[in-house]
Image (cartoon, rainbow, N blue to C red):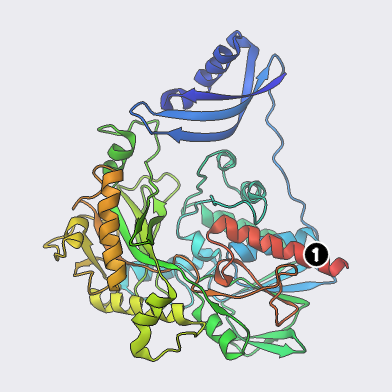
Amino acid sequence: MQQKITLRLTPEEAASNLHIQQKIAQQLSLKPSAVTGFLPSKKSIDARSKQIYVNLSLTAFINEPFHQPTPHAFVYQDVHQATHKVIIIGAGPAGLFAALRLIEAGIQPIIFERGKDVKSRRRDLAALNKSGVVNSESNYCFGEGGAGTYSDGKLYTRSNKRGDINRILQVFVQFGATGQILFDAHPHIGTNKLPQIITAMREKIIDCGGKVFFEKKVVDFELQNNNINGIITADGSSHHADAYILATGHSARDIFELLYKKQIQIEAKPFALGVRVEHPQQLIDRIQYHCDARGEFLPPASYSLVDQVNQRGVFSFCMCPGGIIAPAATHPEELVVNGWSPSKRNNPHANSGMVVEVTAADAIKATQHLNIDPTHPLLFMYFQQLVERNAYQSGGGNFVAPASRMVDFCNNRISTNLPQNSYLPGLLAADLRTVLPDFIAESLSKGFAAFGKKMKGYFTNEAVVVATESRTSSPVRIPRDPDTLAHPQLQNFYPCGEGAGYAGGIVSAAMDGERIASILQAKFKS
């Protein structure tokens, strides 16, 4: 017999299969020998009180042989000689999952990626971190796997309306992720493990007959009769397919400018902008776990914060326990920071984006000296660019980031020194109120104070505030028909993922890629 139950365990109990089986027997009033095994289905930590518990939902095997379920195996077809071909621009989560789903349907994907493969990207990231040299085509945003590969690998999303979240997680497991992501409340792979998984996906695509081209930047579209007739890459070559998926991510500004130049409809999309905040991980552990030191059975603590300041949202974004802050710039004179964590989350710092909602009125006011049309579809992109350039200049170059201790920032003081931190290019104590737009600085200042009341100890000069976190989402939305998902002007052009404004992370981008692929499968069959 199999029975579904939920246990409330101490962290130490949850770390031991023997303890879990004993608790199962106790809850079901059975002898421990009657419990032959269990399969977890959901695991979460409840740290609301001083006594921390792990909530574990599972299926218990009672008086019958225990067996592990056979992992779900997706079947990928041979598409070397496929009738239909689809060009995918971008090898991030949206592009890769679209390609795999197309192969399942017997359609050949052809991926064009402007950046390098994951292994080659590492050298460019090292040059950026150590020498302040950015490769505009190969960096934390551009290259195989997209921004997620070398950013963090968090696999949770607030919305399951776009597709089957569990299916996405099962695909990751098939290509090498641990099965734990299938039941953790906040699944996470880690930046150190994602490259191997992404490589395995690419190898499967190629083995099945798909094609993947690196350092092949798309620079133009050939348009004909309400369709895209082909793409042109930077080397001057032209490439053709039955359909085209645009999955270039939120930082491909040249693509947004190309669409505008070609008079392909795009829209300005509000986004959020702010800073990265870094605390000692031990401090966050003390606050969240209500103890002097985190025990060995608990993971590094995280947090999620949100507040309204003058009717404007201020909230944490992409929180990275045991992580580092990294330079995520895509241009030599624009400063962007992001965060990531390895799978063990064992670095001594905890960082999070802390961002503020930006409205059209904010962007119009900030860019008015540039004489930009207030209705321009690239308005938010130009605003984003303006802040990043100001941050770069304020840091003095080489991607040194302007920064301040948190309380100093809120009290409008330049810090006399800065705490130890994880940002490799280095920090420079600066007046962040001259770096950030006034409304961002004011909102963050009040937000930090409010968060300090929710998390006693969060508002402290042990924390460092680093400018600027500006790539939270795309500043542009590329419209698409709600039924066909094609662009309203181009019947075979499919904007997809974060860059098109339809996703906000690895899982949601992957689901959007699969959704486009399924639409194309139905279209080609009809």
Q: Residue at x 30, y 33 (%)?
A: 290
Q: Residue at x 26, y 73 (%)?
A: 435
Quarter location, residue 325: bottom left
Look at the picture and state if 489 lies above or below 353: below
Question: Is residue 384 visible to the viewer in this orientation of the structure?
Answer: no
Q: Residue at x 56, y 43 (%)?
A: 181
Look at the picture and state if 205 lies above or below 159: below
Q: Residue 246 placed where, x, y %?
A: 63, 74
Q: Nearer the viewer, residue 23 or 193?
A: 23
Look at the picture and state if 231 lies above or below 143: below
164 left or right of 299 in image: right
Amino acid of disc 1: Gln
Quarter location, residue 96: bottom right
Other-residue count near label 1 (Cα within 10 Å), few / some / many at <14 / 14–19 / ≥20? some
Q: Residue 259 placed where, x, y %?
A: 59, 84
Q: Residue 285 placed where, x, y %?
A: 31, 39
Q: Which residue is mark 1?
A: 521
Q: Quadrant where the C terminus lies?
A: bottom right
206 left or right of 121 in image: right
Q: Quadrant where the N terminus lies?
A: top right
Q: Nearer the viewer, residue 345 or 403?
A: 403
367 left or right of 44 in image: left
Q: Nearer the viewer, residue 112 or 411?
A: 411
Quarter location, residue 308: bottom left
For the residue labelled by badge 1, is the local secondary structure a helix, a strand or a loop?
helix
Q: Residue at x 62, y 48 (%)?
A: 169
